Image (cartoon, coloured by chain):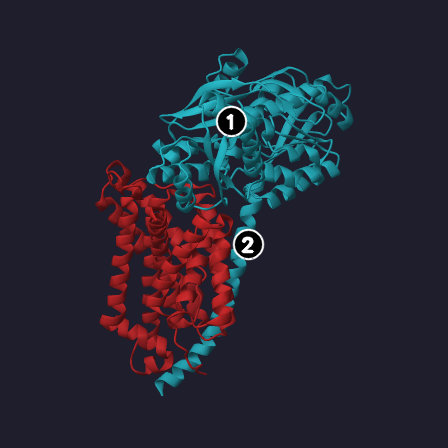
Amino acid sequence: MLEFIQHLVNGLSVGSIYALIALGYTMVFGILQLINFAHGDVYMLGAFIGMYCARYFRLADNPSLGALLIAILFAMVGCAAVGYLIERLAYRPLRKSPRINVLITAVGVSLFLEFSGQLLFGSDPKFFPQIYRPSGDWSIGELRINPLQVIAFGISITLMTILQYIIFKTRLGRAMRAVSFNHDYASLMGIPTNQVISCTFMLGSALAGAAGVLVGLTYPKIEPLMGVMPGLKAFVAAVLGGIGNVTGAVVGAITLGLAEEMLVGYWAPTYRDALAFAILILILLFKPTGLFGSKRTEKV
Amino acid sequence: MKSIFQVSRNSKMSRKNQWIAVALAMSMTAISGCKKSANTVNGISQNNNSAAGDVIKLGEVGSMTGSEATFGTSTHQGILLAVKIINAAGGVKGKQFSVTSLDDQGKPEEAATAVTKLINQNNVSAILGEVASSRSLAMAPIAQQNKVLMITPSSTNPKVTEQGDHIFRVCFIDPFQGTVMAKFATETLKLKKVAILRDVKNDYSVGLANYFKETFVKAGGTIVVDQSYSAGDIDFKSQLTAIRAKAPEAIFVPGYYTEVGLIGRQARELGLKVPLMGGDGWDSPKLKEIGGAAMDGSYFSNHYSEEDKSPVVQDFISKYKADYGVVPDGLAAMGYDAVVILADAMKRAPTLNTEDVRKALLATRDFPGVTGKININDKRDAVKSAVVLKVENGVFKYQTTVNP
């Protein structure tokens, strides 16, 4: 029983990270029907921005929650800028071209970021400075909870709540929803479509940046290709929840995190990465709209 | 009206911008291509003035970048130091060594490409490398096919030299290394219950885990749980939680340092206080960086200890420190020994043709290397002792030497 609860705790903390990345996928898809494959690499950049920020400000000399928040802030701002540039330079010029062109460009941007990362940062793993070290363990009997995981989980939930607020309670959110419904009608109604799309990219990328720092802190080994697998898994999580659906992305991500944890803990550790793709295949076969997705009539 | 106008204007724009995007994509390909070629030709400059007659060309393949980058760079530095010393002493049979080093980025397929290039384009007479068994296994068949000697400094998986009679190694093999740790666990640490956590993507790790298991069980111990992970994973908590439930007295983790550091950290977070044990794949300064205090109290087998007081070792350490400013790790020592043994065989061989050198290598007996007395047996493996080191406050402390 105790082992099970421990697995539950571990799974939740992994799932919350997937959720932060999956949100970016799902938001961009909701608005542009574009799978932004470069998203996982934006997450990688977030981790590196966090690392360089921590080194520059010597945050590791004085570990505190404040230091962590500074690193997260820088990573979020940096990634938002990267997200803006990606959209402006790579996707916007292709707005009116067939979807397959944009998809291939997305793969290209992803490879571009991965290899530029290897060129800039070097391809060997870097140690992420320990900018926040909560003291002690929280243990209930044999159950161990790393306070870092709880903090990471808390920050993820906070950011997701803020996102939910932005989407459903602000003018920007309303504009985003309108654009996702129909670009042309939205622009006829006076909504600056391009700006709204840029904002969506920036929001999604900022979340990925925060995820990068949180992962760097909990698993202090970062490298330029670290975004590939989590990126793909977050994509699966988004599809599982119903791509385009914000709540779905979070639920999908947590489900995936828990499923992986249980699979590794109780059955076959080597199938960890295969599980995500097995889920993807099953979902696409039996319920392509995902858990929360609604059927949309194809608009031509 | 305005919006219709805009749409038509936009579609014209998009065609122009499409070309920009294509150009961008092409330049991107060029960049990633450039990077590869820039990386592959590093190492000491091999000047064009070296006429084929007065140099012996060596090729080196190593992971200068990638997740095991310190393996490649340490070995590379060891090799360069040995070449420098040998050349300064007049070389071999009046000829100087020159080394061409290629980076394989830690990927077996790149290692295969690199070795092909060294043989066909650089016409090297011998290959040094790789550290990782999985990459040496990709290289060995190619070297064998072209009848070029290949000496791996530190690939310990037995399958490597089984690829052919031109493949040698100067390190011990995993059946021995696994035995060393199993004996150390039963005899010195008096352990009865051990868990295994192996990297299934890694020939070295799987082999070492199997040999450890075999000897440990034979000695009366129990493997309470045998878990696995894949290189590149960052979360091991699920495996460790499953291991914790079986309450082992130690965990055998025969992986490479990047993952081992994270495993150590997460084991402590889960309240697993038992020591970790491993093999020479742990040997890197990065282990202490990534694992931090979590690695204290853990043991691993290695090729040499810097605390060894023998003059050969101390002389090597002082020269290495003078050149690179750091204490050499085991992989640097192995890289050094690989070159020195090759040079020794070339000196003893009647001529420098491959077959003569090959026979001379096979006849290597009691050679005083930095990593111990080296004998090459008829399977082209080195027979030599291993040391067990303990991690204490971030320093690798010598524990014991185990002879074959």
Q: Residues within 10 Å of mark 1 (few under 14, many from 20)?
A: many
> Residue A107's spot in the image, x, y percent?
50, 61
Q: Chain of mark 2?
A: B
- Is B375 on the left-hand or right-hand side of B330? right
As rendered, which of B355 and B280 lies closer to the eye?
B280
Position of A156 relative to A66 (above/below): below
Residue topped by disc 2:
B30
Specify the quadrant of the image occupied by residue A86: bottom left
To which residue does mark 1 refer? B181
Q: Earlier in the sequence, mark 1 or mark 2?
A: 2
Chain letter for mark 1: B
Point out the image quarter for the N terminus of chain B: bottom left
Q: In the figure, residue A65 lies in which quadrant?
A: top left
In the rendered image, what is the letter of the chain coloured cyan? Answer: B
One can see residue B94 in this view = no
Position of the C terminus of chain B, as image quadrant, is top right
Please say whether residue A294 is visible from this viewpoint.
yes
Q: Which x, y percent locates residue A153?
A: 29, 53
A198 vs A265, nearest the viewer: A265
Label 1 sits on what residue type?
Met
Q: Colour of chain A?
A: red
Residue type at tag 2: Ala
Q: Secondary structure at mark 2?
A: helix
Give the spatial CA distance, label 1 vs label 2: 48 Å
| Whole-percent x, y for residue B57 in the image | 67, 30
- Callouts 1 and 2 on one subunit: yes
**Regarding mark 1 in the picture, which secondary structure is present there?**
helix
Q: Which mark is residue A194?
A: none
- The 10 Å Cα crowd at callout 2, few under 14, some 14 to 19, many 20 or more, is few
